[in-house]
Image (spheres, grey):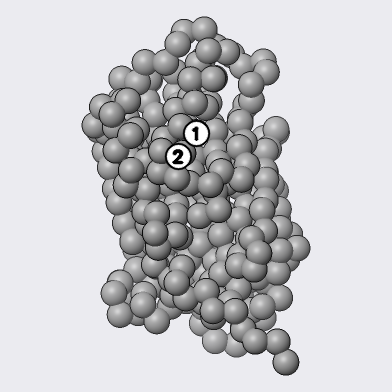
Amino acid sequence: MTATMDDSKYAKGTGIFSIYKNVELPTDVKKRCRALMDLGTETLLDNNFIILDFIPYPGLGEVGQNDILMYSWILSESHRILIYDPKKKTLIDELYTCSPEKDGRIMFEKTNKRLGQPAKNHTLNEIVSKEIALVEEPEKLFHSVEDAYKKHKMVGDHNYCISAVFFDMPDRKLDEDALEDILTVALNKDDQKPVIESACRYNPQGYTYIHQSPKHFAGLHSYPGTLKSAHLSLIGTGDAILSVLSDVETVVYRSKKKEPTISIKVVAENF
């Protein structure tokens, strides 16, 4: 009989969401792309994060003068996304780290040294253990995505950053292939193209999936050992986020006889 892997050390991670205003990047498009990539990479390395993959969107090729740039990184500790709007000169920076040793503080300080203090910043505990969540943040737990959406009074056309955790996931749903199928259904059904995605399996713990499209960003990390959960970061409109969360909920819990337990936090809204 195979022993269940103990991934409990990842039960409580860190999330950092920041919005920087008046960010001046080069006017030359290629130099702007490179500057944003260098900013994200160098500040991660300053924090000793291990970068496993880097995903540019719309990419380093034909990028328009006013195109919004989205760059994301898959880390051995999960993910980071930078979104830059050249018209508004605004930069969104979101990090999720499950590492108990690296909470992103040095990365955040190094980014602030380059860009100045953020106009908005939210740092939160990312709890992926149901037992800890029941004790420390029971008000964040819901039995359905619809209940959470109503409680948070989310508006369909406003932008949001959401932190969601799906607890008590069946082993067959935590398998890499199953997760990829779930997310493909939830994220790609009505997206404009192109969609860029990347995935990484850690040995022996977990699986990370990154998705970027014109409608939203998604970063998922799974905990298939003792935790039996998956954390999902989402940035997009209320309508897009509701669609994704509802589809994931349906696929994950459709065969369950008892109510699901889902943690949903609104990290930031209307930005």
Q: Which residue is drawn at 44% across and 59% down?
A: 99
**Which quarter of the rendering shows the C terminus?**
top left
- The amino acid on which the numbered mark 2 sits, given as a three-letter code, is Leu
Q: Please give left or right for residue 41 compared with residue 127 in the image.
A: right
Q: Residue at x 54, y 86 (%)?
A: 258
**In this orientation, which residue lies closer to the viewer: 5 or 182?**
5
Which x, y percent locates residue 142? Answer: 41, 72
View extreme (bottom): residue = 1
Q: SS at mark 2?
A: helix
Which x, y percent locates residue 159? Answer: 42, 41
Q: SS at mark 1?
A: helix
Q: In the image, is residue 258 above or below residue 141?
A: below
**In this orientation, which residue lies closer to the viewer: 164 or 77?**
77
Q: Residue at x 54, y 33 (%)?
A: 71
Which picture quadrant has residue 102? bottom left
User: Marks 2 and 1: in contact by CB < 8 Å?
Assistant: yes
Query: What residue sits right under mark 2 in the picture?
Result: 44
Examine the rendering and report whether any part of residue 235 can be seen. no
Which picture quadrant has residue 251? bottom right
Which x, y percent locates residue 8? Answer: 47, 76
**Which quarter of the rendering shows the N terminus?**
bottom right
Q: Please give left or right for residue 122 compared with residue 59 in the image.
A: left
Examine the rendering and report whether any part of residue 260 can be seen. yes
Which x, y percent locates residue 235? Answer: 47, 44
View extreme (top): residue = 28
Residue 207's tag is none
- The amino acid on which the numbered mark 1 sits, given as a three-letter code, is Thr
Query: What residue sits right under mark 1 in the picture?
Result: 41
Q: Please give left or right for residue 54 compared with residue 94 in the image.
A: right
